[in-house]
Amino acid sequence: MLYALPRRTEFTLTQRLLAIIALTALTAVAARISIPLEPVPFTFQVLAVLLAGMLLGARDAALSQLAYVGLISLNLPLDARALGAAALVGPTVGYLYGFIPMAFVTGWLVERFAQETWQRWLAGAAGVVVLYVCGVGGLMISTGMDLNAAWAAGVAPFIVFDLVKAALAASLLYAGRRLLLPD
């Protein structure tokens, strides 16, 4: 966990689990900060998932998002529209499942290649691309939209904001680490 930054000690299993739980909870809270657009709402979940990837590293970040989706599958109303398990068959299904590979890819890139803020931003942008591939695929399957319609509904309104969220996550990395695990 927190492999993107130099560390003085190894983190205990308890510290790692608490950090995973914290980022799972942050993703759920970020879902509630939303603007109800159709068919995909604007939320701050992308920021939370990017922070998970950058803070926790690939494996633990993916686990945090797997836990988030798992809680939704248990019918907990943690998605943006508070639908619970119904969200996993609706237009946001690709985005919800896409949080898992997005967190992994972002974390993997930050762990290996991103020492500078601009490099972390690029890692975040790559994670956003992964999310869009999953999200557009989910939109096409769940709504019957063609690629152009799914792009217009599920990517175009969000792309600038999501790239800003990637920059914000890259900038907040050190503060987030201090908040989760003060040295």
Image (cartoon, helix red, strand yellow):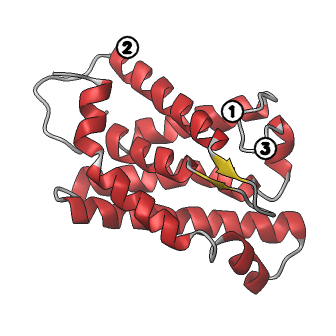
**Residue lying farthest top?**
14
Q: CA distance from mark 1 to mark 3?
A: 16 Å
Q: How dense is the environment of label 1, judged by Cα within 10 Å: few (below 14), some, or many (20 and up)?
A: some
Q: Which residue is mark 3?
A: 81
Q: CA distance from mark 3 to mark 2?
A: 32 Å
The three-letter code of the residue at mark 1 reads Gly
Q: Secondary structure at mark 1?
A: helix
Q: Position of residue 89 (x, y in %)?
A: 85, 50
Q: Position of residue 30 (x, y in %)?
A: 57, 41
At x 81%, y 59%, the residue is 91
Q: Which residue is mark 1?
A: 70
Q: How dense is the environment of label 2, judged by Cα within 10 Å: few (below 14), some, or many (20 and up)?
A: few
The quadrant of the picture occupied by the C terminus is: top left
Q: Position of residue 32 (x, y in %)?
A: 66, 39
Q: Earlier in the sequence, mark 3 or mark 2?
A: 2
Q: Which mark is residue 14?
A: 2
Q: Which mark is residue 5?
A: none
Q: Is residue 12 above or below residue 127?
A: above
At x 54%, y 72%, the residue is 159
Q: Position of residue 22 (x, y in %)?
A: 47, 26
Tell me, yes or no, if residue 108 can be seen here.
no
**Where on the picture, by quarter, is residue 120?**
bottom left
Q: Is residue 77 above or below residue 45?
A: above
The three-letter code of the residue at mark 2 reads Thr
Nearer to us of marks 3 and 2 is: 3
Q: Earlier in the sequence, mark 1 or mark 3?
A: 1
